[in-house]
Every structure is written in structure tokens, then in C-alpha cells.
Amino acid sequence: MPDSIQITEIEIENYRQYASKQTIAFPSRDKGFSAIIGENGAGKSNILNAINWCFYKTEPHQDKNLGKYIINQQYMKSLKVGNTGTMSVKIKLQIDEVEYHISRVLKITREEFQHEQRTDGPVMEIEIIDGYLLPKGTEIQHGDTGFEIMQKEKGQSTFHPLDPKQSSVTKMNSILPEVLSPYFLLDGEYLAKFWQDLSRVKIGVERISQLHLLDRGSEHVSDFKTDVPKIGSSKIDSLTTEINANEFWLKSFDDEGKEAMSREMRYNYDPKVHAKEYYHLSGFPRIEELEQDIARMEIRLGEIAVEFSNSNIQIIEKLNSEEQELVKKLEDLQPDYDLAVKKYIDTQIINGPIVMLLKPLQNLEQKVEKLTKKGDLPYTAKMRFTTERLEMNKCICHADLTSNLDTDNNEINKSRKNVEDFKNQMITDQGLDYTLEMRDDFKNLILKDPDKFNENRFTEIEKKYLDTKKEVTRIRGKLGDTRTKLQGVSEGSKIKELQKDHKFVLQTIKESRNTISEIQDKIRIKREAITKKRIDRTKEMKKDDRAKKLSFEQSIWVRISDIMDKCLSSIKEEIRMDVQNKTFENFTETSFKEMGYSRFTINENYLAELIDSDNLSSLNSLSAGEKLFLALSFISALKEITGYKFPLVIDTPLGRVSARPRYLLSQSLPKYLPDEQILFLATNTEFESPLVDSDKDDPDHKGFPEIPFAQLLEKNVKMNYHKITHSVDKHTATIHDYHPAWEKNNE
């Protein structure tokens, strides 16, 4: 195992934002930590991507580059048709006294790029070519594309390639295994969710300490227990088959000794975690996976509890009640509002013109009065005029129209008789005129008192309409505010989803525990059967001269296997306990010891727990800062106990960490990792903005200096800075040496 691994130089050319050759030299660990500072989107995460791509041909932050091809866009556009382009990442490593030069190169030939015509103009089409996102019309030169590791021993002047017979994966895993990359190529999001994936604990303990090699040896020896050839004795061979079947079941193998998987998918609430993974079919592997999933489900229960708390369920219930009440009021008021609107519209249509014609109507009334007096009126008016004369017994010529009747009731007054005859003659006239009919209405309803007419026909109706409209508007406004508050607090449906999720997780945990119990019972039964059948087979083999030697060999392999299993179990237990205790020691060396945590445990199935002073598990309720501390404490413990001193590259380490944990981290990191190389990929805010003491009002809080995190680090370790400068569109970026403001002020 190497004593010390350090990155001495990174060279990036035409990779993503880096359009030209960018070289970053890193000092040795004794010369301090290094930081590459840049704004969000400038290209920090792509430094981490570049390292991963160079070592393992993967990009952990590929989701941040969706729709963008891997070769720098500006560089691709500058290539002429038919010309060859090159993208590369080259990294120099110093491992003890051996220097390695690791490079990965991608060469392409540019052809005519294809464009898609859109309304806003042509857009270059992109496609996946051999796993790379590239402009359509690009051809990869496979013969010139490759991965190479060169090494130079102490005292040598030139690099020479490693064994050409080895695959690139084998070569790289001999230096820095990919399975360990999550422990030295870190990002803030990974650290925040570190404890959600419990396999990380197992991999960390077993792979970094090389326990997997002992596991392989133990499995290899164990195979000899079941690798018993057929000897022709039906009874012995039958017992061997039964023993093997039971042994295979315990290891989740099929009858041929091959790994057996069920069709049941493992519990998974995060699509990015264990996506499309299935359970082993049986035995110990199945139990281990179920226990891991139970732990993952318990983590989920903690998350649900936090989400419930953050959802402000009481506030939501109150707001939901208010919403229902307002909706009911609005529904009840709606008919009144609709009626008021109708009356208002109707009165505008019917009476509006009358009001507008008030003056002409007054003039018309005056004319009617004059014509009435003169008798110069149309049919209806004349009829009315004649009747009035008869009733008054006075003709317009002043003749007396008093009625005088003879014995036969006949009118003898000639003047009156002439008027009555004229009236009777008009009855047969066909002309119709409603002017006079309207006269009384106009006089009584409008002309007599126009203001009162307006009040009756308009003002009251309009007031009713406006008042109702105002109330509807008020209720609708309040309803809108209530719904906005609901969305701001939490989606109403979110509560139901959480309740459903909570019920599902509890049920799944119950079912998983029942399954574990059933498997444990089967394991006990099969172990008893194996022991009995081995005894029976040994007895039978002793009776067979051909099988006596085989029986002796089997007994030896069984003993060796048992001894190795016990030794492996003991070593695992020792390392597990050492990592467990050292993790907690590192964690409590910070001020988190004030939080009242009593212990940190990692059980035999690598399930981690942080126990508080009340003996309650608190791992799931840790803040972002506490999770970061605990994860770094664990990684530091692994490095210290195993002696595996690999570099740490941490992207956006403080993105979710508040001021107080940042201060504690600045004081603790140099103690955590005293001999390791650390490279930070950080934003200006994380490293150069002063910390803000949010706990000043806490009388028990000692406070901390309101100065930048990087400046606090410099009190305990030397810092080396680089800065990313990017174009306005962030398509190109350059890296250069950098001195923060406080260093410039001291010069």
C-alpha cells in the first residue's frame, strides 16, 4: 500500500470550458492546502470531472453539462472541415518516490456540422458518439484515442510505460482504485448525503484497509469445502450434492455455484441511489442487503419527519380550513352577484337611453301640451282631447256641450251630438300613436322628478352591484393570498404524499424484518443439515477406500476455512472498531462535543449510528455542517488507521454549511488531515466572504471572528490560491495564480 499519494500537476486542454492548454501546479502537502476559486458555472466542478475522466473515463457531475459537448465549443467551431482536433487531460502523481504521468486523450476529425433550423435561427445538432456528447458531423479517431500511464522511478530521467499486457482499468486500479474515488474526489452534495448510502461505510472500511483481499482468500478456501468430486458412490455423491446445495443457498448461489439474484428490486427512494439493483436470492447476502435497506428506510423515516416539520402541517391545516371557508363564502355569494350583475346590465340597456334622452323628452312633453290645447293631435291625442271636451261640457269654440236627452234618450244638444259623432268616427281610424300613452309614464316617472328616477332605476341597483362586486373581489383576493401562502409553506398534496410514503416505509421495514427472521430460521436449519450430512458423509467415506484420502483432505479444508473465517472476522471487527472510535474522536475534537453526543457506532453489517446523550439515534437529524464534519471525520479515520494517504479534492465544500460550522472546520481540518494534500474547488462566497455570526444573541455562544474562511485556515496552514476567470457566456475559462485581498493588503 502506498505511503503517500499527491497530485503534483493537472494539465487540461480543450476540455469543456477550457479552450486552451491550462496547467495547474500543486505544491507538496508540507507547503499547505490549495484552493481553486471561481463563480458558480465558471468551471470548478469540471476540474473534478476532468480528474475523474482522466483516471476512470467517468464524469460524476455530468448532469451539470447537459446539452453541452465534452470538447470546448469555441475550439470545435475554430476547426476547419477535415482537420483533427485533440482534447486531453493529463495528471502527474507522486507516490512515494515514484512519479506517474497519467493521460487520457480524445482525438476527433471535424466534418460538416449539421444544424437544426429553428425560429430563432440555426442550432448545431449534437449526438452521443461512443459515449461522448459531440456535434453531429464529428468522427472519433479511435486509433489515436487512448489512456496511458507512464512512470519514472527515483533516479530515472525519463518516463516509461507500465506493463502493456495489463488493461487500463487494471493499471489505474493498481494506483488509485475507482471504487475508492468517492473517498478522495468529493463534492459538497456527496458529503451532505454521505450517510444515506450505507455501502459507502462498508466499502470505505473494507476496500481502503484491503480487507476485500482477505475476503477473496477466504472465499477461495471455502470453495474447496464444496468442491468434492463424484466418486461413484450413490450415497456419498447424494450427500455431497445436498451439502453443496445448502452451502450454495447460504451464499446466494444457484445449484451450479453461480451468483443468484432475485427479481425483486431493492428498496430505493432516490433514483440516483442503487438504481435498478436487485436482491440476492437467499442466505447471508440477502440478509445483509435487507439490513442495509432497513437502515436506508430508517434514514428515510428521519427525512420524512424533517419534511413534516418543514412543511408546517398545522399552518397548512389552518390555511386549508381558511381556503375551504372562503370558497364556501364565494359559492354562497355568487348567485347574488350574478343577479346584481344582470339587473345592473338590464337597467343600463333599458333605462340608459331614457336618461340620455331626458332633454328631448322634456321638449316633447311641452309640445304635446301645446298640441293638446290646440287639438292638433294624432288619433290617440285627438281621442283624448275630444273626451276631455265632452267631460268638461265645453267646446273649443266655447259652445255649451251639456247633455240634454229626449224621452227616447237621444241627445238633443246639437253641439254635443256633433262632438260625439266626431269621437265615434275616430274609433274606426287605423292610425296608432303611443306618444300619449307614454306621456303619463314620462311625466310621473321621469319628468316629474328626474333625480328620484335615477335613484330608483340606477343608483340603488348600481350600489347593490358595486357592493356585491367589492365583496366578491375581497373574498377572491383573500382566497388568492391564502393559496399563495399554502404554496409558500408547502404543497397541500405534499402532506398526503409524505403520509403515504411514511406508511409505505413502515410497512416495508416490517416486511423486511419478517423476511430476515424467516431467512435466519432457514440458515439455522440448513447449517444443522450441513453439519449432520457432513458427519454422515464422513462415515460413509471412511467405509470406502477410494474416499478415505478425499475425506481427510475435506476435513483439512473445513478446518482451514473455519480458521480463516474466524481470523477475518476478528480483523474486520478490530478495524471496524478502530474506525468507529477514531471517527468519534475526530468528531468530538471539534466543538460538536458541546452538542451532547455520547458515541458513534458501526455494527457488524456496517450500519452507522450517532447516539446522543439521551441514547437516541441522531444521525438522520444532523445539520449540513454536522454531516460534513462526521463524513470528514470518517474519511480521516480511514486514512489514519489504514495508512492510505490519498489526496482529497473537495468541490463546493461549504455550500450548505452555516457560519459557525465553517469556523469550526477552519480550525479542525488541519488537525483532521495533518499530512494529506487537500484541494478545494470553492466559490468566492465560500472562501472569501466574511463569516456572519448569527449566534451573537446567544449568551452562551463565544462568537467567532467575522473574517473569510480561507483567512481563518491560514492561521493554521499555508494556503495556495488559483482563480478561474470565465467569459461572459461562460463557454471558455482560464486558470491563473491568485492572491486574495488580505494578502495583497499585507504586501
Image: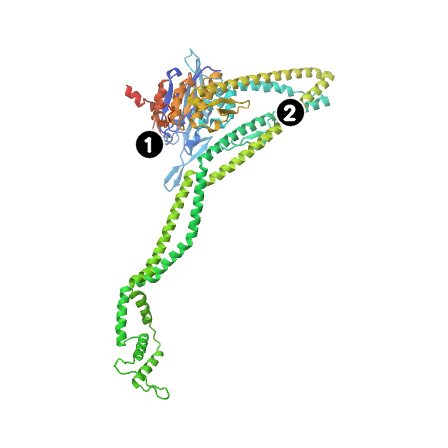
Q: Quadrant of residue 680?
A: top left
In this rendering, the count of numbered labels is 2
Q: Quadrant of the C terminus?
A: top left
Q: Quadrant of residue 254?
A: top right
Residue bearing the label numbered 1: 728
**Residue 682 pos. (x, y %):** 38, 26
| Element on which disc 1 rests | loop
Q: Amino acid at mark 2?
A: Arg
Residue 187 or 484: which is nearer the viewer?
A: 484
Task: Name the residue tied to disc 2.
Answer: 524
Residue 149 position in % (x across, y down): 45, 19
Circle 1 Cα neighbour tier, 10 Å, few/some/many (<14 / 14–19 / ≥20): few
In this view, 93 is above or below 279: above
Give the Cα distance between marks 1 and 2. 67 Å
Residue at disc 2, secondary structure = helix
- Nearest to N terminus: mark 1 or mark 2: 2
Q: Is 434 displayed left or right of 181 in the figure?
A: left
Within 10 Å of disc 2 (Cα), the crowding (few <14, some 14-19, many 20+) is: few
- Numbered badge on residue 127: none
Q: Position of residue 564 (x, y in %)?
A: 59, 16
Q: Residue furthest right?
A: 543
Residue at 71% x, 17% y is 547
